[in-house]
Image (tube, rainbow, N blue to C red):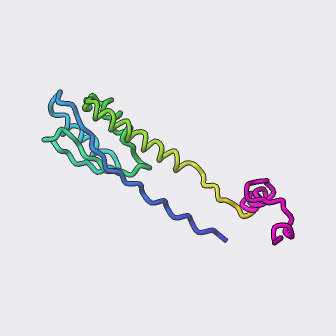
Amino acid sequence: MKRPAAPAPPPIRKQRTIVFARLPPGQVPEAAAYLSSLEQLLVEPREQAREVGVAYDLRQHSLQELESSLEDRGHHLDNTLLSKMVRALIHYVEETQLHNLQTPTRPLKRSQSEAYTHAWERHPHGDHDDTPPEWREYK
């Protein structure tokens, strides 16, 4: 008998903004055209703000991958301190999320929890009183 197929994991949707440097001019339409050619990527060019909005599934793309592919094609990203810090934070968060998705879940088995309970009962801790019960109730 075949087991039913596991359901596909839900997508991890991300919406990011890629900001470009002032020079050279005309980067936004070129970058938007290139990014539009990639599969499973929604692109929204914003020429007045020198940026491109992108929406993607983290399992398919990452911001770091998109930015490095744009830089490889000759585009210049905004290099202000704030932009660099925001990009570094987003790269770290996405990398951590992807790493955590690959980590197998370890369910706590009943035998493991019982082992911890028994070990705690045998461990001398502050709740233990060696006084015999008849002496504790002496009045």
- Residue in front for this viewpoint, 86 or 127: 127
- Residue in front for this viewpoint, 33 or 27: 27
**x and y percentages locating residue 119 in the rendered image:** 78, 56
Residue 40 drawn in magenta? no
Instruction: Confirm whether residue 75 shows in the render.
Output: no
Q: Is residue 27 above or below residue 39?
A: above
Q: Quadrant of residue 109?
A: bottom right
Residue 127 shown left or right of residue 66 in the figure: right
Q: Is residue 130 above or below residue 41?
A: below
**Image quadrant containing the N terminus:** bottom right
Stretch of the chain drawn in magenta: 112-139
**x and y percentages locating residue 48 in the rendered image:** 13, 41
- Pick out the residue farthest to the left: 48
The residue lying at 85 percent from left, 67 percent from top is: 135
Residue 30 shown left or right of residue 123 in the figure: left
**Image quadrant containing the C terminus:** bottom right
The residue lying at 15 percent from left, 31 percent from top is: 25
- Pick out the residue farthest to the front: 139
Residue 117 drawn in magenta? yes
Instruction: Confirm whether residue 11 shows in the render.
Output: yes
Q: Please tell me how many numbered marks the rendered image carries.
A: 0
The residue lying at 26 percent from left, 32 percent from top is: 77
